[in-house]
């Protein structure tokens, strides 16, 4: 795969229990930049499962957006066992959340990004943040950018090889609940709303 850090792949992601393969792509890990731990992403998701009293804003907002329901009604373990996740920038890129990865770090991660997408073969790729969008668009080459809108909020996406790359604002700040409506509208337009709804029913807490 050519990467240091392995992606999170939910237990159900490749099974018939999941009618829609969804890959979420974040920006970067922050912490000890000397770390070469290939399980960094997997441990982060597992920590999110165990620390249910912490919100983990990024993971919680993405979950609520895709699920189309308030986060407190959702089972975070069920959701993340159905999806795959990794950060575009490989390794631990920066010390803190207010620091940004360099352009070099993004460019050097492009090959690994393509390899993971090929390996996981997602049908929908949920790309978070402006920097991720810029590099994903570059990786895909010249493509028509399509738009979808709901409640006055407009978002772009690209259709590429029977795969949809959806571009969202980064969920860590200034993130509107209207993004859930945009995702729903995309699913309706591109014909996967029924499959997404089937998954959403599984994610509600029993």
Image (cartoon, rainbow, N blue to C red):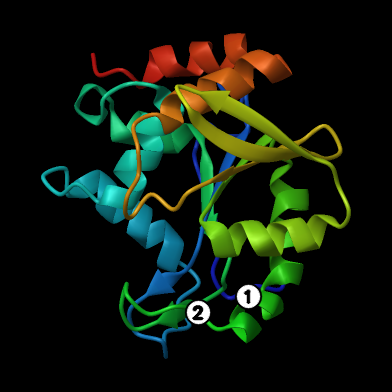
Q: Identify the residue position indicated by label 1 in the image.
A: 106
Residue at the limit of the structure toward the bottom, as seen here = 34
Q: Is residue 135 left or right of residue 86?
A: right
Q: Residue at x 25, y 51 (%)?
A: 56
Which is nearer the N-term, disc 1 or disc 2?
Answer: 2
The vertical placement of 57 against 17, above or below, is below
Please give the name of the residue rendered at 50% of the width and 12% of the height, measured from the top-left corner. Answer: 197
Where is residue 105 shown, x and y percent of the image?
60, 81
**Front residue of 27 and 50:** 27
Toward which corner of the image does residue 159 lie, by quadrant? top right
Residue 40 lies, in percent from the top left, at: 42, 68
Inspect this view and state whether residue 160 appears: yes
Report crowding for label 1: few under 14, some 14 to 19, many 20 or more residues within 10 A (C-alpha).
many
Q: CA distance from mark 1 to mark 2?
A: 7 Å
Give the residue number, with chain letter if any, for mark 2.
101
Q: Nearer the viewer, residue 146 or 50?
A: 146
Q: Residue at x 51, y 37 (%)?
A: 83
160 sits to left or right of 199: right
- Residue 16 visible, this angle: no
């Amino acid at each position: 795969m050519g990467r240091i850090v392995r992606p999170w792949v939910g237990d159900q992601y490749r099974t018939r229990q999941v009618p829609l393969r969804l890959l979420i792509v974040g920006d970067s890990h922050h912490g000890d930049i000397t770390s070469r731990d290939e399980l960094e992403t997997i441990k982060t998701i597992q920590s999110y499962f165990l620390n249910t009293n912490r919100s983990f804003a990024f993971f919680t907002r993405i979950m609520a957006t895709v699920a189309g329901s308030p986060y407190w009604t959702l089972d975070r373990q069920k959701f993340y066992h159905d999806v795959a996740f990794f950060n575009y920038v490989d390794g631990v890129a920066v010390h803190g959340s207010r620091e940004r990865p360099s352009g070099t770090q993004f460019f050097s991660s492009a090959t690994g990004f393509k390899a993971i997408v090929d390996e996981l073969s997602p049908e929908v790729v949920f790309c978070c943040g402006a920097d991720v969008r810029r590099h994903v668009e570059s990786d895909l080459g010249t493509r028509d950018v399509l738009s979808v809108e709901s409640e006055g909020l407009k978002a772009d996406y690209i259709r590429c090889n029977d795969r949809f790359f959806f571009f969202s604002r980064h969920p860590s700040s200034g993130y509107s609940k209207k993004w859930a409506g945009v995702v729903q509208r995309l699913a309706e337009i591109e014909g996967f709303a029924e499959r997404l709804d089937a998954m959403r029913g599984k994610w509600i807490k029993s």
